[in-house]
Amino acid sequence: MLNFFYGGFLIVNTASKTQLHSLTIATRESRLALWQAHHVQALLAERGLDVHLLGMTTQGDQILDRSLSQVGGKGLFVKELEVALERGQADLAVHSLKDVPMDLPDGFHLGCVMEREDPRDAWVSSQYATLQDLPQGATVGTSSLRRTVLLRALRPDLNIEPLRGNLDTRLRKLDEGLYAGIVLAAAGLKRLGLSERIRHIFEISEMLPAAGQGALGIEIKAGRQDVQEVLNELSHQTTWLAVAAERAVSRTMGGSCSMPLAAHATVQGEYLTLLAAWGDLKPGGPLIRAQMTTEVADLKAAEALGFAVAQKLIEAGAQVMKPA
């Protein structure tokens, strides 16, 4: 079991046995979200718990005609799940960590970060094997501001159009011929057994991932030490260190889906290397990158590294998003 601080909350390595016999997981009802919830359900069931799912539709799932940056950001994917936690209808909520706001509401915290799947972005196309194979001016689908600025850096001639919806909806729109290709998280495709749809996986140096991409985070209500004790066994410390640094970059920059910001960290031994990038959305605008490597022993040090890398971005001209 792990024993460290996160967001002021001590995750305790305890020998005491939880008295829990059953748990309810709040989850979105998309196929990927349900896969993630079932994955956690199976791991908890192996530990002798009776685990049920509470499927919910969030505002983020309902609003598909506008980008998240226009309608309220990542919180639209978690609000209803947090209400279920607050009311005691559920004990935990499973999220794709890249969809979780950098600062959770009072009374909630991340109880667990699980081992990360492939954090990279994937190129998906019926006709073109790679991004470089596209003809001049081809249409590529993504609603991610991060992916937009990174795609423009690789191919400034492309026509980048919005693409919302769950993973199956995005693939259907591609198959209907609305796009020459689309960019998706490799982790989601792999988790759903759709690896054959991947034509190319971008290197980290080409398409720097979003903070937390590929990792699952489990949110719980503050004070649920009984649930916390169970989740300690699912936590993956190396992943948590990396994503803590990544999310600290976003937090410092005021980041959300309304900011073209990328951050990705890797751990080698006691050292953490963090890369980040910020792009100007104006055509021809600069793409600013920053990188640091330092020894990191705990989450506090990881977050300090994230802050330092964000400061390097700001010093190079990246713009901080101010609170509304």
Image (tube, helix red, strand yellow):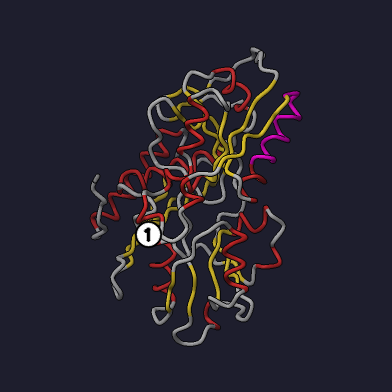
Q: Main secondary structure of the magenta part?
A: helix
* x and y percentages locating residue 197 in the rendered image: 67, 68
- Would you say residue 44 sits in the magenta stretch? yes
User: Could you say whether the residue bearing mark 1 is in a helix, strand or loop?
Assistant: strand
Q: Is residue 149 visible?
A: yes
Q: Which amino acid is tagged 1?
A: Ala
Q: Which residues are magenta?
A: 37-49
Residue 106: quadrant of the picture: top left
Hey, which residue is sitting farthest bottom in the picture?
136
Whether residue 130 sits left or right of residue 107 in the image: it is: right
Q: Is residue 271 visible?
A: no
**Residue that badge 1 annotates:** 277
- Would you say residue 38 sits in the magenta stretch? yes
Closer to the camera in the image, 136 or 25: 25
Image height of 190 relative to 241, above or below:
below
* x and y percentages locating residue 199 in the rendered image: 64, 72
Image height of 26 relative to 228, above or below:
below
